[in-house]
Amino acid sequence: MSKEYVLITTLSHFKLKYAIPREDFDKLGFSEPIDQEQLVRFVSTGDVQEFSQAHLGEVVNDVSVYTEEDMLTIFDIDNAYLKDWNTEQKIRYLNKWKLDETPSAI
């Protein structure tokens, strides 16, 4: 029987604030009333420095059980930057799940 893994997917929520001097903000061309969707697109560009952030928590989105073979497929999809790791390195990484353990897969 293949080893199984419980995969827990969560959504992490942050509250971010951005501060822009009014004079500069007015030059950006936003008209009153300010379009919230346009503002979201504007701050999402990565061109605006974050003023502060607060972590609001995590919510469990999904819990599923997968075989080791399935987990290796998911590993490759979710961690494409580690595609050069061999199977042994990936399994070692999967098995180092405790926060106080540093994965030493490479």
Image: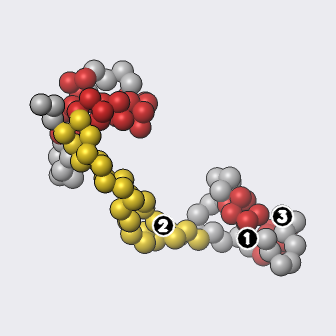
Who is closer to the viewer here, 84 or 65?
65
Does residue 22 appear anywhere in the picture?
A: yes
What residue sits 30% from the left and 33% below the top? 70
The residue labelled by disc 3 is 28
Q: Taking 1 as reference, is 39 above or below it? A: below
The residue labelled by disc 1 is 36
| N-terminal label among 1 and 3 | 3
| N-terminal label among 2 and 1 | 2
Residues at marks 3 and 2 touching, judged by CB atoms closer than 8 Å? no
| Label 1: which secondary element | helix
What residue sits 83% from the left and 64% below the top? 28
What residue sits 87% from the left and 73% below the top? 31
Q: Amino acid at mark 3?
A: Leu
The quarter of the picture where the N terminus appears is: top left
Who is closer to the viewer here, 94 or 5?
5
Q: Mark 1 and mark 3: span between their CA atoms?
A: 14 Å
Q: Nearer the viewer, mark 1 or mark 3?
A: 1
Side of 77 where 49 appears, left or right: right
Q: Picture quarter containing residue 37? A: bottom right
Q: Position of residue 105 (x, y in %)?
A: 23, 30
Q: Taking 28 as reference, is 76 above or below it? A: above
Q: Mark 3 and mark 2: span between their CA atoms?
A: 26 Å
Q: Which mark is residue 14?
A: 2
